[in-house]
Amino acid sequence: TAYSNATNFNMLNRNPDYLTDTTGYGHVLKNNLSFNARYTSYSNIDFVACNADTNSFNLPVTVTKADFLSIDQALLTAPRQADGSLPNIDFMKLVSGSDLIDQGEDVGFAYYGTAPDLGCFESNYIPVPVKLVDFTAVADNNNRVILSWQAQNQLNNKGWQIERATNYTVQNWQVVGFVAGSKTAMTNCSFNDVNVPIGSYYYRLKQIDANGTSSYSDIQKVIVGVIASVKLAVYPIPATSGSIISYYLPEATDVKLTLYNAVGKLLSILVSAKQPAGMHTFSLGIALPDSKGVYMLELSTGNTKITKMFAK
């Protein structure tokens, strides 16, 4: 955002001989906002030789004082906040209904609405913490740990750092991967930790905001190689007909795997047979109803019964 300069955007260049002034070329100018220039909004821009087509000075918008919550320059000398961050002021922030809202182009920065606003502030944005939904970790029989999770409110989410430890007590966490964040309201994420040696492991996710702040997920314990108990997982979620059901049997046993709706009505018996020890996986396939909602898997193996809730 440029305000009250003689020329708000002056892109004067030098020719390759570094001696002769020339109109600016090779610039990329996106989503800029010019207001109240004392002489002109821009000068010395060769629009043919630049990538500069989504700015207030070449879009069909009108910029007036009414577009801003405040243009009081005295606000710029307000004290910083107690934590040292810049003061939260209204200077040059857009009012609701301004025709400068959602007029920009997505250039990789977080934004609120259907497109970025023009200028340096996003209007109507209320930061909402990233919400982690149903984080699971399960080992297969190929020394691989499959992590899957669902995230909401990822507007300012830089991404997810995957951490693994062999001893939860001494917190010897090791970074084993990273999954970038997404701008969509609901995102299914997954990560495969491959070639994991036989043993017990703990996994957690470190969610990192664009401003560097972070938070941790709950911790998942996984045993790779020799597994002492029955395990059941569904991934990814929300489930689709392509989602995978995975369960581990420490010994050969009779297995019954059934699918119920949210109120406990039996929908399908997926497995009813004696099965060998080891990891068993298959597609949820046509057993999953067409309607969205919450469903429950129940895995019965002799004296063991495990249930798993999941959403479609």
Image (spheres, helix red, strand yellow):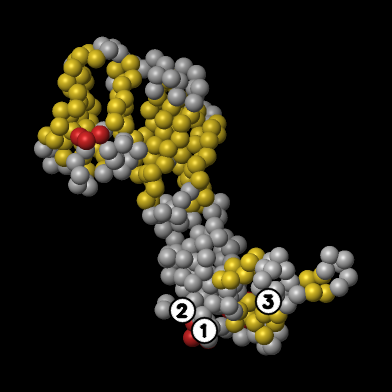
| Res 204 visible | no
Which mark sits nearer the N-terminus, 2 or 1?
Answer: 1
Q: Secondary structure at mark 2?
A: loop
Quick check: 268 left or right of 60?
left
Instruction: Name the amino acid, label 3.
Output: Phe
- What is the count of numbered marks? 3
Q: Residue at x 58, y 74 (%)?
A: 55
Q: Indicate the position of residue 255 as horizontal and vertical percent values.
A: 20, 19
Marks 2/1 in contact by CB < 8 Å: the verdict is: yes
Q: Which residue is mark 1?
A: 62
Amino acid type at circle 1 is Thr
Tell me the quarter of the image containing the C terminus: top left
When the figure is inspected, residue 270 is found, relative to residue 197, above or below; the finding is below
Q: Gap between marks 1 and 3, in whole Å?
A: 17 Å
Q: Relative to residue 153, is residue 43 drawn left or right? A: right
Asked which quadrant contains residue 273, the reply is: top left
Residue at image point 22% right, 47% down: 292
In this view of the protein, which residue sits in the foreground, 122 or 63? 63
Tell me where residue 78 sits by quadrant: bottom right
Looking at the picture, which amino acid does disc 2 mark?
A: Asp
Q: Residues within 10 Å of mark 2 (few under 14, many from 20)?
A: some
Identify the residue under disc 3. Answer: 9
